[in-house]
Amino acid sequence: MTIIAVDGPAASGKGTIARALARHYALPHLDTGLLYRAVALNLLRWGGDPESEFAALRACDFAQTDFADAELKSEMVGGVASRISAYPAVRAALLERQRDFATQPGGAVLDGRDIGTVIAPDADAKLFITATPEVRARRRLEELLKLGRTSHYEDVLIDIRARDERDASRAAAPLRRAQDAQLLDTSELSVEAAVAQAVAAVESRLHVVDHRPAI
């Protein structure tokens, strides 16, 4: 079994890198952020209050969720997802779903903000992907424009910084780099270069794991 944990802030490139690693190692991939976005979208469509932890917990129902729904990528949904992800009850409700995915036969690649610290602390390889807020805002803006959504760089940058603050300061599973996670700053890297460095980092870690002396 091979479990690869990929963490990092919004628009750092962690999703792109995680998907590439999943293809490289022929492993299933889970974007755990989509789970929180799905809860947020349910909450909005049901008319729930994002300020209510109880309402957010009730929205942790994926029976009717289409994870290919383009609305999951909207800024509104992302903002609500960032807020409700701070609720301990919501995180607890999604915990086992993520851990079950990670520990399935053969392993998996998961990306999020607490994979290496909470969901899969014993992962075989851990990466923490980052980039400057300005670079991440430009990437996010390009993604939104490709989706046909109107937005402005300044607004996206403000949102990126606000999400960073919420993610890092929340009491439940805050965004932080695991002590044994390898840091990869993608600010000045192309997608190809970032993926190549990620694969090399994982290979170095898997090599260490494979060659640990028997006890």
Image (spheres, rainbow, N blue to C red):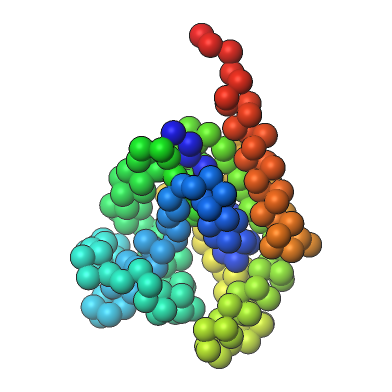
Q: Residue at x 66, y 48 (%)?
A: 198
Q: Residue furthest top?
A: 215
Q: Residue furthest right?
A: 188
Q: Residue at x 62, y 61 (%)?
A: 13
Instruction: Pick whichever, 6 or 68, lies toward us.
Output: 68
Q: Residue at x 58, y 61 (%)?
A: 16
* 84 w.r.t. 113: above or below: below
Residue 178 is at least partly visible in this image: no
Q: Which quarter of the picture shows residue 152?
A: bottom right
Q: How far across and how far down the image is residue 125, in percent? A: 57, 38
Q: Which quarter of the picture shows residue 142?
A: bottom right
Instruction: Pick whichever, 73 or 59, lies toward us.
Output: 73
* Tag count: 0
Residue 132 is at least partly visible in this image: yes
* 121 w.r.t. 134: above or below: above
Q: How far across and how far down the image is residue 158, in percent? A: 62, 76
Task: Judge from the rendering whether residue 108 lies leftward or rightward of residue 207; answer left or right.
Answer: left
* 32 w.r.t. 95: above or below: below
Q: How far across and how far down the image is residue 202, in percent? A: 62, 40
Q: Residue at x 53, y 53 (%)?
A: 23
Instruction: Pick whichever, 16 or 97, lies toward us.
Output: 16
Q: Which quadrant of the figure contains the N terminus? A: top left
* 108 w.r.t. 52: above or below: above
Q: Which quarter of the picture shows residue 100?
A: top left
Task: Judge from the rendering whether residue 83 lies leftward or rightward of residue 161; answer left or right.
Answer: left
